[in-house]
Image (cartoon, rainbow, N blue to C red):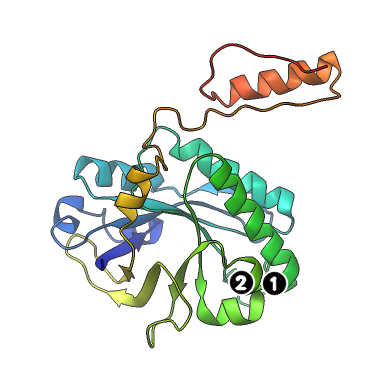
Amino acid sequence: MIKNGIDISYCNNTYSKIDFAQVKKQVGFCIIRVGYRGYGDGSLREDKWWKYNVNGCIEHNIPFGVYFFTQAITPKEAEEEAWFVLDRVRGLKLDYPVYIDTEESGHRQNLGRADHLTPNIRTECIKTFCKTIELAGYYAGIYCSENWINNMLHYPDLKAFDFWIANWNRKPKLECGMWQLSAKGMCDGIKGYVDVNKTFKNYPAIMKNNNLNGYSAEQNVWQVTIWGLTDDEYKEVCDWLKEKDFPHDDKVVKEE
């Protein structure tokens, strides 16, 4: 099943707001940037057009997924990025994956905080992000170029995850569920160029049939057993769960 779609961020609203009524006529899906980590100070930031883009897709019934631009330099930071995304997609129904975007920072001298990670460390960060997303009941994927896979990642450790591969010259040789084939597409409702993508999987069916990405009422209900906590530590965990607003049955059991 091949469908054509686009990926969007604040960049596509630079000249004028996206007209999603027009976009709906031309695309089968959108992948929306949730946010990013700054390549300098490392702060987590929401894409300033995130809410507008999501609401536009929902209002006009355009299936969508999301992506986050990573600059994590440790697995702990990658986990923070995953929770940043999960906090923003909770309550939404995503027909397409939750992607981590791993590529050069865009700094003119390649001095972004994650630009010079070793392939092994970068791979561990990506694995941590994806596993955190999956444990929360969402379908995780990885966005990058084919060259990035071959030179900046340890691909065998990531083959279990779905790839969205950018290659603007030809179809990727590596297996992928989505292919970004151009950065110079044109779409009614968007002023300027937009990235164009093709999918090779029926993602909406995958999400619905497997109760992923918000399509299950029981999603994100976890049973967790923790040993060895003091009473204060146990209270801290319970307070954290309430702060994150996880669905629960109001029955908390502490294992001794």
Quarter holding the C terminus is top right
- 175 left or right of 240? left
Q: Residue 217: tell me if it is visible.
A: yes
**Residue placed furthest toward the bottom:** 169
Residue placed under numbered mark 1 in the picture? 111
Residue 70 position (above or below residue 137): below
Indicate the quadrant containing the N terminus: top left, top right, bottom left or bottom right.
bottom left
Amino acid type shown at disc 1: Leu
User: Could you tell me which secondary element the residue under label 1 belongs to?
Assistant: loop
Q: On the picture, is 35 further left or further right than 182? A: right
* x then y, percent, for residue 123: 67, 65
Residue kind at label 2, given as amino acid type: His
Dot 2, how many residues are within 10 Å of its Cα: few (below 14), some (14-19), or many (20+)? few
Q: Residue at x 26, y 68 (%)?
A: 2
On screen, residue 8 versus residue 226, left or right, reads left
Q: Depth check: give the residue in front, 68 or 119.
A: 119
193 shown above or below 72: below
- Residue 212, by quadrant, is top left
Alpha-carbon span between mark 1 and mark 2: 6 Å
Image spot of residue 6 (x, y percent): 31, 64
Label 1: few (<14), some (14–19) or many (≥20) C-alpha neighbours in 10 Å:
some
Tell whether label 2 touches label 1 (CB within 8 Å). yes
The residue that disc 2 covers is 107
Residue at 61 percent of width and 11 percent of height:
251
In the picture, measured across the screen, residue 158 lies left or right of residue 73, that is left
Between residues 255 and 134, which one lies in front from this camera angle?
Answer: 255
